[in-house]
Image (cartoon, grey):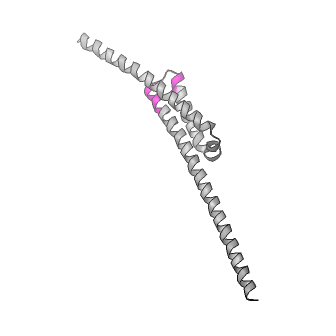
Amino acid sequence: MIRHAIVGASIALVAACAAVPQATTELDRARSTYRAAAASAEVQARAPVELEIAERALADAERFHQANGDPGMIAHFSYLAEQRARIAMKTAELRAAEAQVATMSEQRNRMQAELAARERGASGGATR
């Protein structure tokens, strides 16, 4: 019976030790991804709300890490922060593409209006 308790305690200790490096690695990845998103002027301009959500998730992960909290919670909030930072970057890309499409559409409409005006002018001059 004591032998089973010792084996169980050893397994729990090994599992806990394995979770700490994983949580730290995930936190480092989250920090790196967040820094990349925050450094992007495009993200700051086009996805500030998404970036703020990523920042809050990273702050939660940092708080758990500093308090020597549950490695599972650190890993969880780190994962959320990393994914939220990626969402901010993709949202900025999407909004930049939407802005480009809108600009191109405006240019097309302007060119069509100019062409129609020229055609009206050319046909009006021919009938005189």
Quadrant, the N terminus: top left
- Above or below residue 98? Residue 51 is above
Q: State the image coordinates of residue 32 (x, y, percent, origin top left).
A: 55, 31
Q: Quadrant of residue 121?
A: bottom right
Q: Is residue 72 magenta?
A: yes
* Left or right side of 127 for 15: left
Q: Nearer the viewer, residue 39 or 59?
A: 39
- Above or below residue 115? Residue 40 is above
Tally of numbered tags: 0
Q: Quadrant of residue 103?
A: bottom right
* Left or right side of 22 for 37: right
Q: State the image coordinates of residue 53 (x, y, percent, origin top left).
A: 57, 40
* Magenta highlight: main SS: helix
Q: Is residue 25 magenta?
A: no
The magenta region covers 64-77
Q: Quadrant of residue 111?
A: bottom right
Task: Answer whether residue 37 is visible to the viewer in this image.
Answer: yes
* Left or right side of 68 for 15: left
Quadrant, the C terminus: bottom right
Task: Answer whether residue 55 is visible to the viewer in this image.
Answer: no
